[in-house]
Image (spheres, rainbow, N blue to C red):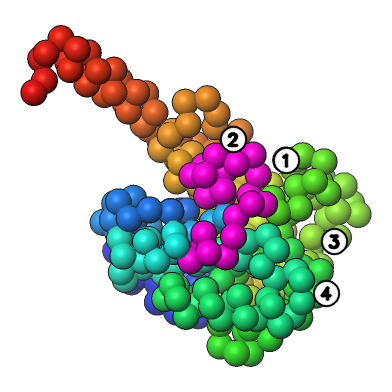
Amino acid sequence: MTLKRFQYPQEWIERKKQKIPISVVTCYDFMMAKWISRTEIDAILVGDSLGMVFQGNSSTLPVTVDDIIYHTKIVRRGAPDFFIIADMPFGSYQASKEKALMNSFRVIKETNCQALKFEGSDEFTLDVIDQLVRSGIPVMGHIGLTPQSFMNFGGYKIQGKKEEQKKVLLEQAHKLQNVGCFSIVLELVHSELASKITKEIQIPTIGIGSGNGTDGQVLVIYDLFGMDPDFTPKHAKRYANFSEIGIDCLRKYDYEVKQKLFP
Ligand code: KIV
């Protein structure tokens, strides 16, 4: 099935109506963006997960606006006609509304991405998103286990098992829809609740570790490829084992140089 490549956020909502799942993958570099651009994947997220899988930090907190701009520009070069969402990193939108708007405008102007993603749905963040949407910037929400505030969650645990949490998450999804988000990432949300949210709201839900009842899925490309020899998150599926292939190539190269077999 060949589908028209997303250009505008409204097409995400149309896709939900057609009940055709949306595939999203993260990307941080030129070559992988080139690979993605040869597929039917619907959109690329330049996620702040780059702080962990690309930069080797233990969380996403150290990622800066400059990092996001740097990587999004590179990804844009590899996938010129893709719908690209840039993640707003920790500290880029919490200090004040003015700073949040200035950082957001900067990312849009400098990267040529189509949309921004924000974690959370507290009143302040909703106000920022509302203003951005009114200014013409498409925004993707992100609730559930939001990694920028992983400290508050006491670790990477499934959210929405308890009645109280269910109510809160459902309300958050509605609030994000009401301020004009075109889509919402549901991260580590209990699958029954993720399905319920998906049925209740009109904008597409993109799940990660939230079961198969969402309107689409997003995976971190390094997890999908099996790039880390030591770790794969429980929710991820390794479609290949690139770390094994890579390490094997390096060993062969080392052997051949030392044996004078190469060049
Ligand atoms: O930063 C990221 O890659 C993300 C996805 C996991 C949704 O936010």
Mark 2: few/some/many CA within 10 Å (<14, 14-19, 20+):
few
Q: Are marks 2 and 1 in contact (CB under 8 Å)?
A: yes
Circle 3: element type = helix
Residue tagged 3: 168
Q: Position of residue 139 (x, y in %)?
A: 59, 74
Q: Quadrant of the C terminus?
A: top left
Residue tagged 4: 123
Q: Is 159 or 242 nearer to us in this picture?
A: 242
At 41% from the left and 69% from the top, the residue drawn is 83
**Mark positioned earlier in the residue sequence (2 or 3):** 3
Q: Magenta residues, as a range?
A: 49-69
Q: Position of residue 231 (x, y in %)?
A: 55, 29
Mark 4: few/some/many CA within 10 Å (<14, 14-19, 20+):
few
Image label count: 4
Q: CA distance from mark 2 to mark 1?
A: 10 Å
**Mark positioned earlier in the residue sequence (1 or 3):** 1
- On residue 156, which mark appears? 1
Q: Which amino acid lies under the numbered mark 2 shown in the image of this protein?
A: Pro
Circle 1: element type = loop
Q: Which amino acid lies under the numbered mark 1 shown in the image of this protein?
A: Tyr
Q: Is 140 or 52 nearer to us in this picture?
A: 52
Q: Position of residue 140 (x, y in %)?
A: 60, 69
